[in-house]
Amino acid sequence: MKLNFFKKFFLVNTMVFLSSIIIIVLLLSIFISNYTTTDKIETLKKNCNIITSTYAQKNDLNALDSDSISFLRTISQVSETDLFISDSNGEVKLCSCDDWSIDGICEHNQNKISKNIIDKVMLEDYNESGDLEGHFSQVKFTYASRLTDINNETIGVVFATISSTNIRGFFNAIFRLFLFAAFIPIIFMFFAEYFISYKFTKPLRLMSEASRSMAKGDFSKRIPVTGDDEIGELAIAFNQMTNSLVQLEGTRRHFIANISHEFKTPMTTIGGFIDGIIDGTIPTEKQGYYLEIISSEIKRLSRLVQSMLSLSKLESGELQINRSDFDLLDMVLKIIVSQEQRIEKKELTIKGLEDISPTTLNADYDLIYQVVYNLIDNSIKFTNEKGLISFEINNFNNLIQFKIRNTGEGIEEKDLPYVFERFYKTDKARSAVKDSTGLGLYLANAIISIHGGKISVKSKQDEYTEFTFVLPCKISDENKKGKSKKQ
């Protein structure tokens, strides 16, 4: 049978508690048993010493009178022990029990004491917990010592015994008392353990349920935070993870919607024009014009696919930075020259390049080229006819600052926080520029970030738009080795 965490936690803690109780009971039993045994043996020893010291003036066992017998019985009754005396051969001559006082026959003198026991007593005082080598019908505690006369000659052996049944009864009474005293705490512990186990494992059950819901696409469930312990921290982390997944899911859906739109528009245009050429709707003399539009849309799709590949590499951490030293000004001039026809067509003015000195930057040439190209390309697209594009490159505190500003409609203030998000376009940009993928600024931001820099934008509507990025101009020797960097 499969046990859930709550049952395991509850059973383990219950077993630990009960095991602790059992160990305590065993240790207490051993302690009580040892203490009681030691105490009884000590009592038997004292009784033997009293008898041996009292009867030391007797020359032999036959000299014991009625007073001696009465004294023996008194000591026996006071201490609740049986006392009997045997000669050196093990034959019992005197006993304190009631049966012996009646007719001189009792369990103690039915058989002679084992010679082995007598010999041991002759060497030193003897004690045991047993049947005295078959002399008793049950287990008893026994202590024995020599009985000597006034000349210290052995005239017999004194035995003091007590039944172990009395000790077991005493122990059982204590055990029952302990169980009765522990019963209420055990019941209380049981319910407390159940409650605590349930409380501790409840967040885990909720997390399990929430995880199953998330697997089905439901991200609405949150875990209540009921404390500041590790479970509470786990609940907070789980909720934060859920919020991140919600944002990620929203981004994913937004991404799919945008990419579907970006692919659908040029593909619809291409398909429509091709169908028009095939079925003759478009006249032969106008086919060249529409083929140029088709070519433009295919190039747009190609740029979109390339941007998507770059985006995929960035987000998967597979994009490698191959650093080298190059002149940033030279890169800008090459891009300007490549866009000369577009610049002349819109009669744009380029300003600031003549005031910039050669500036060496250590970075990935191709990636930075893509960033600068995107910024210049956007500036040309959105600058008004006969407008102005200005450049500025500054070098200070081991940082290189690149600025590009263009005149034109600018970007509305409400759109500024979102211009670096993927597929984000303002409505004006979407309607005015059909060849934009909506990924250029997102990729520029990501490329600058993995180089350890920052990119920002400022704009005033109907006046200007300015993009600025800052990069460290020098890096450590370790980074210059061209190691891979992951986003």
Image (tube, helix red, strand yellow):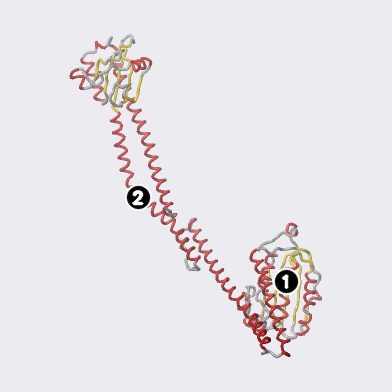
Circle 2 sits in a helix, a strand or a loop, which is it?
helix
Give the x, y percent position of residue 242: 52, 65
Closer-to-camera residue (171/293): 293
Give amino acid for label 1: Gln
Which image quarter: residue 176? top left
262 horizontally vs 234: left or right: right
Give coordinates of residue 103: x percent, y percent: 18, 18
Label 1, on which residue? 370
Which of these two is toward me, 460 or 243?
A: 243
In this view, the residue in front, 213 or 334, is 213
Q: Residue drawn 53% across and 67% down?
A: 243
* Vertical arrangement, residue 298 with respect to residue 194, above or below: below
- Rendering coords of residue 455 (x, y %): 68, 70
Q: Which mark is residue 188?
A: 2
Picture quadrant where residue 119 is located: top left
Viewer-closest of 141 and 388: 141
Mark 2 packing: few (<14 Cα in 10 Å), some, or many (20+)? few
* Amino acid on which disc 2 is placed: Phe
Q: Looking at the image, is mark 1 or mark 2 earlier in the sequence?
A: 2
